[in-house]
Amino acid sequence: MVVFFISCKEKQTHGITAQQIVDKSIDACGGDLYRTSSISFDFRGMTYVKENAKGQKILKRIQKNDSLDIVDIKTSKGFERYIDGELIATPDSLANLYGNSINSVHYFAYLPYGLNDPAVNKEYLGDIKIHENNYHKIKVTFSQENGGDDFDDVYLYWFNTKTFKPDYLAYGFHVNGGGMRFREAYNERVVNGIRFVDYRNYKPKASSSSINEIDHLFMKGELELLSKIELKDVAVSPGNYN
């Protein structure tokens, strides 16, 4: 899933808009530190790094084993792969695949920050109670232009009405036969001013389930735990954003 780009289309409910909720959430979870900080973390045996160079965001994925060091770099200019420090020619199809994978991991790690990318369309769906807490439920879609390869995917986010933190998210996807996922945040920690969480990753037990009802399926125990998404060794430092 690639997201780079905010639509003016908003639905106002109970005196607050989807845009206002997202803005409050970003402020509560790290604010401008997302943009200016350098960040690194380990995920499933690889190290991910976000750096800033003269205002440009640089996303990296680093794989190391006994014989090779592989560094993949994603920027606004494209994708590059280095093996043991040497730039390797990468076919466009693989460059796109690797670049999307890198962007996806970084995107989820820094939520809710990415929800203000320019191609994001946000719609307030109302309030719902989950496990004794009240949430603003927001639907997110993406414009086709600059919305990435999976612009037609649909996302849902649940923001705590008191803290404005996104405790749950879900999405429907079309690749590899399609499906739905529901993520429950846990292990919240703040590292140098930025909130990070891990997720329990679920899917519906019934393939005919609707993405719009996935929160009710969660509360009724009708989701199956697939995996845990855990970020390890998270580090945040002031970035060079000049």
Image (tube, grey):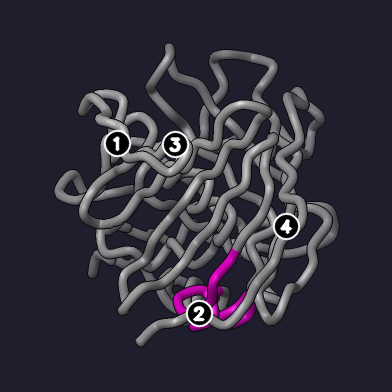
Label at residue 101: 3
The numbered dot on residue 239 is: 2
Cα–Cα gap, marks 4 and 2: 21 Å
Look at mark 4 in the image and give the residue it sits on.
Answer: 197
What is the secondary structure assignment of the residue under circle 4? Answer: strand
Amino acid type of disc 3?
Ser
Identify the residue at horizontal 57%, vertical 74% (top origin).
Answer: 25
Q: Nearer the viewer, mark 1 or mark 2?
A: 2
Rendering coords of residue 79 (x, y %)? 29, 43
Give whichever of discs 4 and 2 has the lower sequence position: 4
Left or right relative to 222: residue 1: left
| In the image, residue 28 lies in the stretch drawn in magenta | yes
Q: Earlier in the sequence, mark 4 or mark 1?
A: 1
Q: Which range is magenta?
A: 26-39
Which image quadrant: the N terminus? top left
Query: Residue at left 31%, top 58%?
Result: 121
Name the residue that disc number 1 marks.
152
Image depth: mark 3 or mark 1 in front? 3
Q: Look at the image and tell me in which quarter the C terminus lies.
A: bottom left
Q: Name the residue type under label 4.
A: Val
Choose top left, top right, bottom left or bottom right for residue 152: top left
Q: How many marks?
A: 4
State the SS at label 2.
Answer: loop
Residue at the image position 69 percent from the left and 67 percent from the top:
235
| For marks 1 and 2 on the same chain, the one whose residue lies earlier in the sequence | 1
Q: Few, some or many C-alpha atoms within 10 Å of disc 1 (few <14, some 14-19, many ≥20)?
A: some
Amino acid type at circle 1 is: Asp
Q: CA distance from mark 3 to mark 1?
A: 17 Å
In the picture, residue 137 is in which quadrant?
bottom right
Image: 117 above or below 190: above
Q: Say if residue 1 shows up in the picture.
A: no
Give the SS element for disc 1. Answer: loop
